[in-house]
Amino acid sequence: MSVSSNYNSPSFKDEIKKFVQSEFEILVKSLCSEEELKRVPNISEIFSENLAKSIVEKVENPERDKKLSILYTHEKNFLDILKEYKEEIKFATTIQSEIRKEEATFFSSTLKEVCNSLKETQIDPKCQVQWIYDLVSSYTSSLKLSSRLAEEHVISLLGDIQKDVSDVINKE
């Protein structure tokens, strides 16, 4: 992935030099008299050579190219590793999403249904309140446990991904 390889030919520098020299000569001729031009006959050659050299040095930067190549390789390897874990990442995301949906469903509809069913029975209201309280506590505790397990799975998955990335980096 070398950028500078496109510019290593002498023709690239020569093309820049010719272009700069041509434009510079047009500009100088429009600004200077014939007499002034005769005093410094090779100024356009010197100027165009220096400018062409400067441009080529900016374009051809092996140190930058090496760093970009390393970065590109690192990012490519990282994406390859993420692709390997794609299904596990989807699974972890799905579990967390299902836990949130289940919690929302419980508090928005299931709990109301249970409360309405209990109201229709002949059970003492104090017992109803206690049952509802116990149900909510038990269910909340269960959701927290499920959520913690899902978080631990995600943390473990991230650890595996980081380990694989470290292994790949250390091989390079």
Image (cartoon, helix red, strand yellow):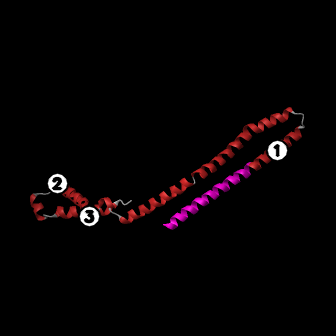
Q: Residue 60: give x, y in percent of width and height.
A: 32, 62
Q: Secondary structure at mark 1?
A: helix
Q: Measure the C-alpha gap from mark 2 to mark 1.
A: 91 Å
Image quarter (top left, top right, bottom left or bottom right) of the N terminus: bottom left
The residue wearing badge 3 is 53
Location of residue 29 by image quarter = bottom left
The residue under the point 26% across, 64% down is 53
- Which range of residues does the magenta coloring cover? 143-172
The residue under the point 44% across, 63% down is 70
The residue under the point 23% across, 60% down is 11
The residue wearing badge 2 is 26
> Between disc 1 and disc 3, whose residue precedes?
3
Q: Measure the C-alpha gap from mark 1 to mark 3.
A: 81 Å
> Between disc 2 and disc 1, whose residue precedes?
2
The residue under the point 69% across, 46% down is 99
- Asked whether residue 5 appears in the rendered view, the answer is yes
Q: Secondary structure at mark 3?
A: helix
Q: Which mark is residue 133?
A: 1
Q: Residue 100: give x, y in percent of width and height.
A: 68, 45
- Number of residues whose C-alpha sits closer than 10 Å to that of mark 1, classed few (under 14), some (14–19) or many (20 or more): few
Q: Mark 3 or 2, which is nearer the eye?
A: 3
Instruction: Determine if the magenta segment contains residue 159.
Output: yes
Instruction: Determine if the magenta segment contains residue 167.
Output: yes
- Asked whether residue 51 appears in the rendered view, the answer is no
